Amino acid sequence: MRALFIGGTGTISTAIVRRLVEELNWEVWLINRGNRTSVLPEGVHQIIADINDEELVKEKLEGLFFDTVCEFIGFTVKDVERDYRLFAGKTRQYIYTSSASAYHKPAASYIINEGTTLANPYWQYSRDKIASEEFLMRKYREVGFPVTIVRPSHTYDERHIPLGVHGKKGFWQVIKRMQEGKPVIIQGDGTSLWTLTFNTDFAIGYTGLMGNRHAIGEAFQITSDETLTWNQIYATIADALGVELHPYHVASDFLAAAGDKYGFDFEGSLIGDKSVSVVFDNTKLKRAVPGMRTEVCFHEGVRRALDYILSHPEECQQEDPEFDEWCENVIAVLESAKSLL
């Protein structure tokens, strides 16, 4: 079996490529700019090209046919229209990576399945994913383009710590605040429900859909079955660090307003996603992929991640003084408001 990945070196796709090559004996090709070849297993075929250079890519793909084409960097309708032109007639299956943030916010029920309405008025990223899904499903219905849609939720790996509130430079400043005994901002009261999935678990579900005829023309969410509150998530991180957590709860709409001045998009990432309780019903996936299972619970996954992050400071520990200052300002303003009452 032969697969082509558009991208292939990101948080999710790296684990899938490794599983295909090391465990499932697929022939794997990647098309990307070649910036992160060090994360790839031996035996991967690489096509160095910008996927947006359509004529060059078409030339490089001449004579190649793939059982599955896997799209991981398609964010807009323009991207999937390009893919349709490139891969119609050149693959038995095209898997588009959408997002669980595309589900209605807030949904009528906190239990989410593939039939939950797609609508997100708070986040353009999600609306673009919805529009891309709609284009691809229309091509499936009208001309039989063999699309499968997958919707990840919050997926992480050994190089990332999943958080609700962080700055433009990622998670590290929050970890540093924990280590220094500073208060850490958590959206809302911290009791909303959330699901975190380690990338190797996601890869089990995803690879089970590859080459699977039951997946053609269908959408599947792929997540862990473990559900935690955000308070539990932050407490688990603090436990793994061996420090005491000092949570500071702030309403999501306040964070969205307070973040605008600094360019933090908390309206999209919080109100349009992480502040809303979700519990994913993966029944449909497990019918199509009976081997789907969760092997890495969060308390184990976060320890794996911290082991790697703490031992790779240059790669993973990017300080963010702007975000640190913002946290202090938000906390100071709210404490001052309390004193006036």
Image (tube, rainbow, N blue to C red):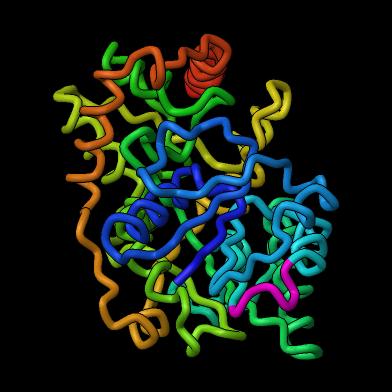
Q: Residue at x 55, y 21 (%)?
A: 330
Asked if the magenta segment contains residue 88, the reply would be: yes
Asked if the magenta segment contains residue 31, the reply would be: no
The vertical placement of 25 against 210, above or below, is above
328 or 118: nearer the viewer: 118
Q: Residue furthest front?
A: 63
Residue 90 at what x, y percent from top left? 69, 73
Q: Is residue 80 left or right of residue 69?
A: right
Read off the magenta span: 87-92
Q: Is residue 79 visible from the viewing direction of this image?
A: yes
100 or 141: nearer the viewer: 141
The vertical placement of 270 against 308, above or below, is below
Residue 122 at what x, y percent from top left? 71, 53
Residue 21 at what x, y percent from top left? 35, 56
Residue 87 at what x, y percent from top left? 72, 69
Q: Residue at x 42, y 67 (%)?
A: 206
255 or 285: nearer the viewer: 285
143 or 152: nearer the viewer: 143
Q: Residue at x 45, y 51 (%)?
A: 12
- Look at the magenta stretch and give its main secondary structure: loop
